[in-house]
Image: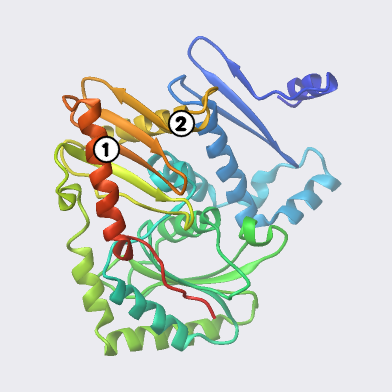
Amino acid sequence: MQALLSCVQDNSDDLSCIRTSNRLFVFRCHPPLIMVAIAHLNESEEQLCRQLKYVHHQAVFFLTQSHMARLFKNRHNYDLRRQLTGLPKFFNGIIQFVEEEHSFLLESIRCLPMPQSLRNEVTAILLSNRCPELVFAIVIYERQIISIVRPKQYAVTPQDLHLLMNYVQTGSTRGHGEKWAPCCLPDFNDGGYLYIHDSYISETTNVSLVLITNEREQHITMIECKQRIVDQMVAQKTMEKLEAVLVSPFVCSDTKIPHLHHFIYKSRSSQQLVSPEYTAPYNSDEDRRLLHAKYCQVHDKLHHSDHKISIYYDIDARESVVGYLMSNSEIYCTFSPFVTRPVALNNIDKLLKWIRREENRFFILGSGVY
């Protein structure tokens, strides 16, 4: 593989992909690593590039970019698997995450829909109990963000949050368990470590609290900080309010938009998206996988077409999917296959107005900064 790439580079060119009758090979160089993805032809080059980028970021998450550079500087044929013993589950997790989660496709984060007053209450508890050593505090429910607290001068990118969510979900510490480990957030600083304290807030939910510091010796401090946060949540009955939200997830029928089966809406300014939980006719994992693949195809048509387009309409026997790019947002909607294009566009307009009325529930708009 390296010889093939070197041959192309000797001719002042780069090898991006190879297509055969039934396979697509995609190559990307992320020095010192060469990344290769092999897939069936129903996946686009852009989709595979996205997966390779996250696999590379996952390696940086555990090793840092500077450490990998030193390893290969000393030995060009170094076997990186020695450094990754026990970690394949996280790489498998991030690949599965990319293949299933809409937030990877749209390079954004998905927030848990909830009343703004409850989100503000969680944020206020994090801020009031933070310690000087704390850099970031994040409350996560499965693959959705509930609240983030950060310094005014720093932000956490969606890509770094995806890595954190994969770390939390793949290395689950349900109940009283907790993890304390170094990690590198590539967009924040790919050359150094931060230190994560990850634990679940209660035994009965999947709500986890991630506390991040840049000081290796602050494990006990983070445990104490977590306990203060949990104690205040118990005192204010915050967890009871969160549990009430979790048992009533947001579904498509809440919009009252006729013939609408599913949708994804992204706010470009906040890099956040909203998407309802899957309901009929997407009851099986295979149904959901096929719909996500259709979203990927429509996304690629809108973002990687030779001609600039703002609306793309795709219809088959299962559903009609419409992608619509706007100046500050983008939306992808799935309707019954019997819905005509004018009706679909009219329903999208109604949906956009509904989302704007409900944006306080769907997005983190308040300031969790200090």
Quadrant containing the N terminus in the rendered view: top right
Q: Is 136 displayed left or right of 314 in the figure? A: right
Label 2 residue SS: helix
- Identified by mark 1, the residue type is Asp
What residue sits right under mark 1 in the picture?
A: 285
Residue at 64% x, 76% y is 216
Q: Count all numbered tags in the image, as a single digit.
A: 2
Q: Is residue 179 above or below residue 79?
A: below
Quadrant containing the C terminus in the rendered view: bottom right
Quarter-of-image position of residue 249:
bottom left
Which sits in the foreground, 183 or 334? 334
Q: Position of residue 173 (x, y in %)?
A: 39, 66
Residue at 40% x, 49% y is 266
Which sits in the foreground, 16 or 40? 16
Disc number placed over residue 302 in the picture, else none: 2
Answer yes or no: is residue 211 visible: no
Which sits in the foreground, 330 or 157? 330
Label 1 residue SS: helix
Residue at 57% x, 34% y is 49
Q: Position of residue 304 (x, y in %)?
A: 53, 29
Answer yes or no: is residue 349 visible: yes
- Identified by mark 2, the residue type is Leu
